[in-house]
Amino acid sequence: MQALKGFKDILPDEAALWQRVEATARDVFQRFGFEEIKVPILERTGLFARSIGEATDIVEKEMYTFNDRNGESLTMRPEGTAPVLRAFIEHALHLRRPLSRLFTIGPMFRHERPQKGRLRQFHQLSVEALGSDHPRLDAEVIAMARQILVELGLAAELQLNSLGCPACRPAYRQKLVNFFAGHQEQLCEDCRRRATANPLRVLDCKSANCRALNAKAPAILDALCPPCAQHLTTVRRNLDTLQAPHRLNPFMVRGLDYYTRTTFELITDALGSQGAVGAGGRYDSLVHRLGGQNLPGIGFALGIERLVLLLQEQPMAPASGPDLFLACLGEAAAEYGFTLLHQCRLAGLSALMNFQTPGLKSQMRQADRLKARLVLLIGANELNAGQAVLRDLTSKEECQVPLNDELAALLANKLPTPDPLISGL
RNA sequence: GUGGGCGUGGCUCAGCAGGUUAGAGCACCGGGUUGUGGCCCCGGAGGUCGUGGGUUCAAGUCCCAUCGCUCACCCCA
């Protein structure tokens, strides 16, 4: 038995990093006024077909889609925006606040060939801000995405582009089609196909010939209508105000059809061929397209696996172990220790003991390998004397402590330095 | 879907041009005088060499197939 291709178990060591990612993100979300929303993993297939776009790769060949027992076509969500917007519309959240700031954390599914930083079940921090088309919102959301990386101690380049709106993009698209039609022989095989199907895609082709040609192609930034151009300018100015350095990348294209105007990516070179740790953009007509009011919005997603990969490349602080290890010698001591163990836990300590009660040396070694801070030694002598030996594993200091009902509280007081990150949750 | 690399004890790997009981490091368990850890020393447990077929007197080592992992392409967080 083994996990499915592209599906991965997250073992405890790695899970610790996940917790750090989530805790950091939640903290940032909270400060920016974003609230959590939890939505289902399974949705009707039509939701994604309508939102992501019928002709996208995701919808055409990457979705986990199947019929349920009623014959209805269901899909494991390939991204977070569509389900969140569905819930937003279904529960009329726009009536509760003028601007809804939502985030969700969870698994997404795409049937792709796995590679570094890409799995069939992957996880995202997904953010949506609904109800405003103000460029300050763009800047705020983008700055928030960046801030999560900053607070994780990660570096990434922020790239920005605008894809225009229904007023200007179709015309630009046509200009591109015409341009590429006149230079077909200079395009790579893939791009000849893209040139008509999805001409924007040609712009981010990696082949040298295409890139050379792209440099001469009509630029989207020149084709933006005045409102879109103004929007982009203001977003950039606001990003500068927030001291969020960014680079304009007119060749940046998104894989989902619903984006309008602002798009952005957080790029790193440490993830193999997967450059983006996060990406997003504005989608001013999506809520309406999904059957809701005509409400603008903007969102982004950060790939948790990718963030964890980046964190793993950094020097890691050694994991901390339990506060206390109870080394019990003999059955009577173990019996006593088992009760004390529980009292210590109720008093707020993380505590462990070995139920088999092997030799003391063995238990000491175990305590050491667990990275326990204190060891309390209880044997027949201690039970008789009513005093046990408490050893600090780092300082090697030992002292006698009374075996009474106050002991758990006394031990809890001996450890006045809780981890600030954990206690802040 | 396409292409490359790889599949040996829990992990990282070594196994030379095919030849006796398949090794190491880490991790794990035990011991180094009777009740004290981290270093060191000694010992122990743990492997159908991914799977199936084939070649051969003999295959972890060669051939074929298959499965899986991995990296890249496509695409994407």
Image: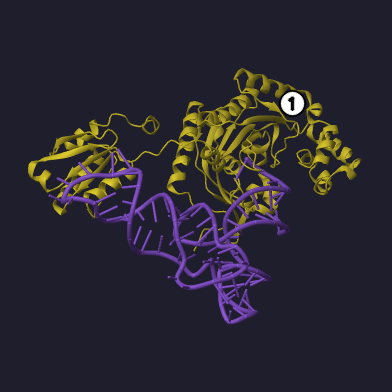
Chain colours: A yellow, B purple
Residue located beneath label 1 in the image: A228
Circle 1: element type:
helix
In this view, the residue in front, A77 or A184, is: A184
Residue A293 appears anywhere in the view? no
**Above/below status of A372 relative to B24:** above
- Tell me if A219 is positioned left or right of A145 in this view: right
The total of numbered circles placed on residues is: 1
- Tell me if A368 is positioned left or right of A340 in this view: right
Amino acid, disc 1: Cys
Q: Quadrant of residue A310?
A: top right
Instruction: Indicate the position of residue B70 as horizontal and vertical percent values.
Output: 60, 51
Considering every residue shown, the one lying at the far left of the view is: A384
Residue A168 appears anywhere in the view? yes
User: Residue at 83% across / 40% down in the picture?
Assistant: A209
User: Residue at 43% across / 35% down in the picture?
Assistant: A317
- Tell me if A372 is positioned left or right of A401 in this view: right
Q: Residues within 10 Å of mark 1 (few under 14, many from 20)?
A: many
Instruction: Indicate the position of residue B19 as horizontal and vertical percent values.
Output: 54, 71
In this view, the residue in front, A361 or A284, is: A361
Quadrant that contains the C terminus of chain A: top left
Instruction: Indicate the position of residue A276 as horizontal and vertical percent values.
Output: 63, 38
Considering every residue shown, the one lying at the far top of the view is: A241
In this view, the residue in front, A63 or B75, is: B75
Instruction: Indicate the position of residue A278 as horizontal and vertical percent values.
Output: 61, 37
Q: For mark 1, name the chain.
A: A
**Above/below status of A214 relative to A384:** above
- Tell me if A10 is positioned left or right of A256 in this view: left
